Structures are given as C-alpha cells and as structure tokens.
Amino acid sequence: MGRRLALSATPETAKQAGRVEDGAALRDAVLLTRPGDNVGPAGLLLLARRRLAARPAEELLTQRNLAAVLEEFGQAHDQEAVRDPTDDLRHLAANVGTVGMMSGAIAIDEGHGLGLSLGVWLADALLAQRLGWAYAVSMLGAEADLGTGARRHRSAASSVAISVERS
C-alpha cells in the first residue's frame, strides 16, 4: 500500500519540481536500472517518496535520514543544511498544533531554500509522528497542483491546511 501511495504522489511531486515524468516513467526510472545505477532525478523523487512510506515514522526526521532525502530530492547538502532544518522541525513539532506544524514544515523548508517538494515530504513525516503512526503516508504529495492552477493565489502552506481540513 505504501509503495502504491508513493507512486501516486510522485508525479505531482515531480511536477512541482519542474519535471514532466508521469507515474509510469517514474516507476521505470527505478525498476529498469540495475542496483547501484543512477536512476536520474525522476527516479530519485520516487525513491524519496518510497523512503517516506518504508521507514518507521520516528526515523524519518533524523539527521542521517534527512541527508539521504536531500540527496534523493537532488539537493546538495552539508552538515548545517541537515542540522538546521532538523532542529527547526523538532522545535516546531513540540510547540504548535497540527495544521501549524504542517504549514510550518513547508515554511521552514522553503526558508532553508530546500524547495516545496521536500517541505511537503517533511510535513507528511511530521503528521505521521504527531498521529503516532508506525509509518508515514504520502498524502500531501498527492495533493493536485499544490499552490497552483485555480488556487494559485493561495500559499503552499494554506493549501496544506485546507488539505488537512478535508481529511
């Protein structure tokens, strides 16, 4: 189930990142390469979404895992690039409500220059931890045209808040 949700969320994540691959192309980027081969930017997005569903929720926001996720999202990173958002997310999770925590995750991520796709991934991870789930579900990444299209005047954070209210 988690892999299926990851695959359905990834095309939207790819679109947000300026990619054009659909679900089949993303899946093929991962499945049609040999272990150790470069799966390319599209394949890395799918691997990041799969990581969200495959790792226990309490491990998702560790510095080690966040470094791997940054790499999968094609972001260069150093220790500070990993430590600062991790500390900010830990503080956020401890001090605000659920909707504020999720929109804050996106704001923190964008504030560190890491991009909306990763911010949505982090919000999914925080939600799983807040709700005490064993594993995260790729829910926000599947939100159609997050912050664009007919809703282009809404910020990404307000789109997340509306998505949560619907659930």
Image (cartoon, grey):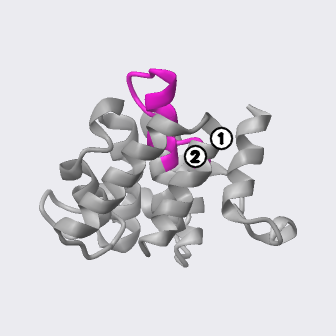
Q: Residues within 10 Å of mark 2 (few under 14, many from 20)?
A: many
Q: Residue at x 39, y 53 (%)?
A: 88
Instruction: Point out the image quarter for the C terminus.
Output: top right
Q: As shown in the figure, which amino acid type bears the numbered disc 1?
A: Val
Pointers 2 and 1 in contact (CB under 8 A)?
A: yes
| Residue situated in front as seen by the camera: 153 or 38 | 153
**Which secondary structure, mark 1?**
helix
- Seen in the image, is 151 located left or right of residue 161? right
Q: As shown in the figure, which amino acid type bears the numbered disc 2?
A: Met
Measuring from the top left, give residue 138's x and y in whole percent: 52, 42
Q: Please state the extent of the stretch shown in magenta in the rendering.
A: 123-140
Measuring from the top left, give residue 30's x and y in whole percent: 32, 58
**Which secondary structure, mark 2?**
helix
In the displayed structure, would residue 87 be above or below residue 151?
above
Q: Residue at x 56, y 64 (%)?
A: 22
Q: Residue at x 45, y 35 (%)?
A: 94
| Residue situated in front as seen by the camera: 156 or 117 | 156
* Residue designated by label 2: 102
Quarter occupied by residue 33: bottom left
- Seen in the image, is 104 located left or right of residue 84? right
In the displayed structure, would residue 165 be above or below residue 131?
below
Measuring from the top left, give residue 166's x and y in whole percent: 79, 36
- Seen in the image, is 15 located left or right of residue 61? right
Magenta span contains residue 127: yes
Measuring from the top left, give residue 163's x and y in whole percent: 73, 44
* Residue designated by label 1: 99
